[in-house]
Amino acid sequence: MKKIYLIALCLFGINTFAQKKIVVDVPNKVSEIQPTMWGVFFEDINMGADGGIYAELIKNRSFEFAKPLMGWNIEYPAEAKKEVLVKLRHEGEILVQNRMDKTSANPRYLTVTVNNTQKGELGLSNEGFKGMGFKSGLRYDFSVLARVITGSVKMHVELLNAKKEIIGSTLVTPNSKEWSKIESSFNALASEPKGTFRIWFEGTGVVDLDMISLFPSDTWKGRKGGMRADMIQLLADMKPGFVRFPGGCIVEGFDLNNRYQWKKTLGPIEERQLIMNRWNIEFTHRPAPDYFQTFGLGFFEYFQLCDDIGAAPLPILNCGMACQFNSAEVVPLDQLQPYIDDALDLIEFANGDVSTKWGKTRADMGHPAPFNLTMMGIGNENWGPQYIERLKIFTKAIKAKYPTMKIVNSSGIDPESRIFQHLNTELRAMNADIIDEHYYNKPEWFLKNASRYDSYDRNGSKVFAGEYAAQSVQTVSPNNKNTWQCAMSEAAFMTGLERNAAVVEMASYAPLFAHADGWQWTPDLIWVDNLRSYGTPNYYVQKLYSNNKGTHVLPITESGSTIAGKDSLYAAAAWDKNANEVIIKVVNVSGKAQNHELSLAGVKKLDPKAKAFVMQKDNLEEVNTFENATNVSPAEQDITVDVKKKIINLSLPAKSFIVYRVKVLDK
Ligand code: AHR
């Protein structure tokens, strides 16, 4: 009976694949793996910056949105009639003023007029970015720019829970005739994921208000007016080799006026002119009329973030072309100089001595040391002869002044298109430093393309897999999910990126963040709401790769061939010269478990104790959620090495991705 059971098991059960002899040739360091290999792509999409990592809780703090009071409500007693609101709004008690000064980045402000007004009779409330998250006991920092015109006006500042009960408050009274910043900090007395904010005005007088702001105190590194710590921690935990910023399509803008201009994102926040976020109007099925880029986070803050988490900065600049899916505007070639100046000045801003104009700007903002910029992108998903002719002018100017600066070049939107073929040929003929390839495709595409780079020229331009994500339904479908199937197919594909680290020097999943109530694009690596955040299965795949990067590619073969899909198996191996460890990544995408023998050839002595980090789910549709944030995530296991035979047994469950780390004691 036992025998029949065993035969049945072999025929139909756990291992219908013949046992393979897999070999890692440890002394054979094929090529280096760049420290930049695994990074992150950041864009203000899906409320990634405003309402996301930028911890500001007030939406439209400077009244500069297209509708000046968007996000705000005028408050008056509940029993009052609608006519009261009409009177308040249109007869001037709350008046939107516009300085009509074309040089001002922040022309609008509010004038509030009260006349023997009691608390509860006239106020303003702010809905936040899909509500506001408050944490019990946490300090909140309120600030406002104010100027007293006449009299005295008290401001009762309140945090409200979803039932409109007060869960935190402070009182400020503007007293300066000149614009001045008033600050007051106070604690929230209860937690609330969907709170709001309110100010009641009291007294008799007239006061001007601008930049009404509220930040939690538990920001990343405790910086005032800083970033949301839980979201940044998830990034830091990945130990990314680079951060690409600020996008994405927002680099290009809907039209050239709407393009990202880094110089306008520096200095005091009240002087940073906001613009509409192009994701505001991109998808009619996901409208976001209240999506603007306030630039509270600007280029200084992105460089500082890179510095904080030890990632190389990779800024992408507009090349003189707006998004070719939108207006497709181009700047005439004889007017390209300001765009080129932006690129040259950015290098000075990042690396220049403090005696230079832009180096001094950096120092004045608090970072005299250089940011060590070594690469920059010119254009995002731009294509056509218009791109090439602009790119050539940029390249000539940048290389003339900064010969070692590496330039990342666009190859369009689809690596299988005619557009790509044309650009790729042109760029390689130009000896381009790095070519940015983007692929948003079905999981099957990722499996089929695990060998994509095996045939790329080792001596030609390098590749940046700058945006990729497996799409469970189809690109830009709102029904795409971050399933285990998608994550596992990316893990399989990434074995091909790592094996070809001689060509692929950088890779990043995209997009990075999404707010559960405010997204435009799915899937995304990390999901958040007002208080919580979690990594998707895709996040854990990226993190496993990045935390187990290694320094050199090692050959891993079966019968002399790379392992890139035969019998549903994908594998890559790396040497980590700092830890003296061999790192093996294996993906079994089949529905059957597989057991294989892996021999570590060319080593003298191995540590008998090794580690495996296992991601596995039988159900390919499994996802992570706020409630079950680590449902699909790695489990650490101890494994034993046969030190005599220099063998480890690969026990690969169905639908699994495993990273092994084996220490070499003596080579
Ligand atoms: O990642 C979302 C978008 O996809 C990026 O903004 C763009 O570069 C690509 O089309």
Image (spheres, grey):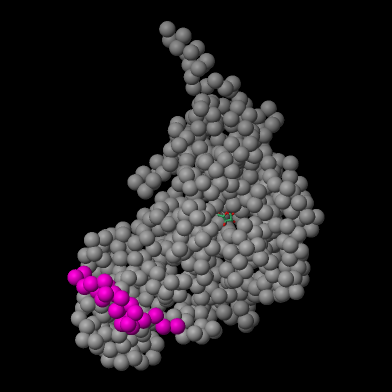
Most distant residue in the front direction = 83
322 magenta-colored: no
92 magenta-colored: yes
Task: Work out whether residue 661 can be spotted.
Answer: no
- Residue range of the region highlighted in magenta in the rendering: 75-98
Quarter occupied by the C terminus = top right
Q: Is residue 158 above or below residue 580?
A: below
Residue drawn at (60%, 27%), measured in percent from left and top? 567
Ligand 1 position by quadrant: bottom right
Q: Is residue 318 above or below residue 555?
A: below
**What percent of the width, then of the height, locates residue 24?**
63, 35
Most distant residue in the right direction = 429
Residue drawn at (45%, 75%), measured in percent from left and top? 64
**What percent of the width, then of the height, locates residue 644?**
57, 29
Answer with left or right where residue 17 lies relative to residue 626.
right
**What percent of the width, then of the height, locates residue 201?**
26, 80
Q: Is residue 440 above or below residue 267?
A: above
Residue drawn at (54%, 84%), measured in percent from left and top? 103
Quarter occupied by the N terminus = top left
**What percent of the width, then of the height, locates residue 511?**
53, 53
Along the viewing direction, whichever of 168 and 586 lies nearer the viewer: 168
Residue drawn at (61%, 39%), measured in percent from left and top? 445
Q: Quadrant of residue 244?
A: bottom right
